[in-house]
Amino acid sequence: MFQCPEPTPRAKTSSIQTKFIPEIIALGFKQFLCILYPSNYLGEGGFGRVYKGFIDDKLRPGLESQPVAVKVLDLEGTQGHREWLAEVIYLGQLKHSHLVTLIGYCCEDEHRLLVYEYMERGNLEDKLFRSYSAALPWLTRIKIAIGVAKGLAFLHEEEKPVIFRDFKASNILLDSDFTAKLSDFGLATDGPEGEDTHVSTCIMGTEGYAAPEYIMTGHLTTMSDVYSFGVVLLELLTGRRSVDKNRPSREQNMVEWARPFLKDSHKLDRIMDPRLEGQYSREGARKLALLAHQCLSVHPKSRPTMTNVVKTLEPILDLQDIPIGPFVYIVPTEGKNESGELKNGLGGENEGDMKREGRRDEQKEEGEEEEKKKKRSHQHQRGHRHRHRIRTLRTRAVYSDTALYKTLGTALYFPKPEPLDEGA
């Protein structure tokens, strides 16, 4: 992270104006002593250590009982009182379903603490890149992208716009349902007002996420956040970090490595996250790649607004062309039997061996004993040569990995195996 001191946004004083933040609770440090134990430790970031705790109406009458996350400012860390104060002020004033909820704070002597709603799934960075985490499914990734896009759109469309400035995977928290929320407003700042097109600030942010024009000139706009969103979108597509020094030199910068593939749907699979194992919508991936390409444009004016980003993302969630895996689907086109059931829709399985395709000849041209021998011989051969295959009518089978499963998969008729004649 690179940063330098600058005035505190929306407040030029070190004291907190309670009229700005009527819904959050001012707490004394002693109230946290029962929480700050190693057994409650969750992790650590630039702000300091994070602990898990629990609050109820004993803290304040009428307060909902709930688990919380408590961030303790490390005075020797990369963030200080200015970032702590920005967090209190912004989250004290801004309420949205995709912004993490600030419940309380402590400002006593040298102690600076923040109390948030507890987010069970942790942050997106851990879910995407930690080897111990299972791969996030495709639709979960889209849901996360839509959630944080709505959060940024809300900030940008405020009467007094807010630029998040440090949008990255580690600042996206996930609840038990993988609803994504923005956290860590320490570097947030007010956007341009009136006829101003940008604000000039010291360069602050995280390598790999900051927009190129901001790094070069210090000019900050809402489009700077859009660029950072494009980086996270690309991380969701590729499963790679924005900057990874452990990769070959040409692949260390994810944006530069992936950019040539984003507009070519025939080459897109080369950069898709291999942990998805192909289980994603091809059309959705194509649209997501094109959107990422727009967000990552070197020209800020060519980037879409976050409102338009949301409009592009939401339809992707409804696409049905997601492979399920190798299946054999039967299209029942034959007549029905007397009970109205389809005849021989799918054959039954007898101890893992499938019966021979088609129906047995109804007329016996040879003697009964010879016919029984043929049946046993054929069944034995088919059981070894076609073990675990599905028997079908001599109509047509549709092999598909996609949406046909959703329409036919649960409606197919599975008749019981036909019993063999006695003595077979």
Image: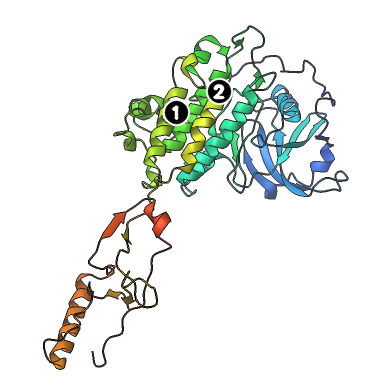
The residue tagged with tag 2: helix, strand or loop? Answer: helix
Quarter of the image for the C terminus: give it: bottom left
Question: How far apart are labels 1 and 2 at the CA level?
Answer: 14 Å
Residue 331, x across and y down, in percent: 32, 61
Residue placed furthest toward the right: 61
In the figure, residue 404 lies in which quadrant?
A: bottom left
Question: How was the colour assigned to the protein in this rendering?
Answer: rainbow
What residue sits right under mark 2 in the picture? 225
Apparent side of residue 299 relative to residue 75 in the rendered image (left or right) = left
Outermost residue toward the top in this view: 195
Mark 1 touches mark 2? (CB < 8 Å)? no
Residue 97 image offset from top left, x and y in percent: 66, 37
Mark earlier in primary sequence (1, 2): 2
Q: Residue at x 86, y 48 (%)?
A: 58
> Mark 1, residues whose alpha carbon is within 10 Å: few (<14), some, or many (≥20)?
many
Q: Is residue 142 left or right of residue 99?
A: left
326 vs 1, nearest the viewer: 326
Q: Residues within 10 Å of mark 2 (few under 14, many from 20)?
A: many
Q: From where the camera sits, is residue 275 visible?
A: yes
- Element class at badge 1: helix
Comparing 278 with 43, the one in front is: 278
Q: Residue 166: image x %, image y %?
A: 58, 25
Count of numbered circles in the view:
2
- Amino acid type of the residue that numbered disc 1 sits on in the rendered structure: Leu
Residue occupying image coordinates x 66% and y 15%: 5
User: Does 247 appear above or below 377?
Assistant: above
Q: Which mark is residue 291?
A: 1
Tell me residue 217's x, y (percent).
Answer: 53, 9
Question: Who is closer to the viewer here, 398 or 257?
Answer: 398
